[in-house]
Image (spheres, rainbow, N blue to C red):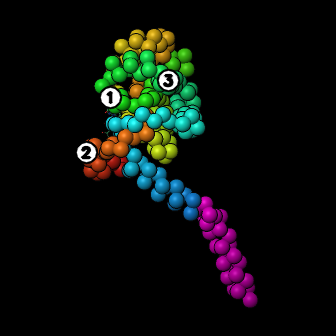
Amino acid sequence: MKKVLFFVAGIALMGLFSACNQQPKEQEETTEAMNTDFLTLAAERFSVRHFSDKPVEQEKLDKILEAGKLAPTAVNSQPQKIYVIQSPEVLEKVNKLSPCIYGAPQVFLFCYDDNNVCPRGENDNYGDIDVTIVLTHMMLEAWNLGIGTCPVGYFDQKELAKSLELPSNIHPVLLMPFGYAADDAAPSEKHSTFRPMEEMVEYI
Ligand SMILES: Cc1cc2nc3c(=O)[nH]c(=O)nc-3n(C[C@H](O)[C@H](O)[C@H](O)COP(=O)(O)O)c2cc1C
């Protein structure tokens, strides 16, 4: 009799233990669905280098900016300063300073602000890194909403700051033209060229 009681108690405990370790089925399914969708989005996004004239609706623009707000930054310092360039005068200026605006009707200029940035040692800070993560959040949310983007580093940061008369505490990092892709926009060859995973990743 004792043996039977121990056996039943053991089974009950095992059941309890595995229930504690299991994710609810619904949560498990959601996690799986999210992983699949994110990788599809990441694989399908490409740098758009030919835009249509159609401006992005404010509702979509607000969501893209919200995605930037939600990005992680060092010590949550949130040093980003984002300019939405859309006036003909400022668009003309950036077009003069970079060959990589690709006819976009709107361009983000991503900067960091000295007054908010987190220092990294004595002579460095996290500004470039934080701002690039913010850009990445926005680039992916844009694609999610059907809006194309192209991150652009090909411009002289000092010249741009001078031309736009930015305050001295604001440092330009990257530009990102955005908008609806023109009908003939297509991924470049580089979009699907990858170094082998074994070269890029090492388990140590
Ligand atoms: C930091 C950074 C700077 C970039 N600068 C430029 C640029 O100046 N001009 C441009 O056309 N593309 C630029 N790109 C886009 C890359 O060339 C592109 O992401 C890469 O070739 C992979 O292609 P895909 O984005 O279509 O997947 C830049 C991307 C990053 C992340």
Q: Earlier in the sequence, mark 1 or mark 2?
A: 1
Which x, y percent locates residue 168?
47, 10
Q: Which mark is residue 189?
A: 2
Identified at 50% across, 45% down, the residue is: 145
Residue type, numbered disc 3: Tyr
Query: Separation of disc 3 and disc 2 at Cα?
Result: 30 Å
Q: Which residue is mark 3?
A: 83
Quadrant of the rendered structure where residue 75 is? top right
Residue type, numbered disc 1: Cys
Confirm whether the magenta stretch covers residue 12.
yes
Element class at badge 1: loop
Identified at 32% across, 28% down, the residue is: 100
Q: Quadrant of the N terminus?
A: bottom right
Residue type, numbered disc 2: Glu
- Alpha-carbon neighbours of circle 1 within 10 Å: few (<14), some, or many (≥20)? many
Q: Which residue is mark 1?
A: 100
Query: Separation of disc 3 and disc 1 at Cα?
Result: 17 Å
Q: Which mark is residue 134?
A: none
Residue behind label 1 places its C-beta within 8 angstroms of ligand 1: yes
Residue range corresponding to the magenta coloring: 1-28
In this view, the residue in front, 175 or 147, is: 147
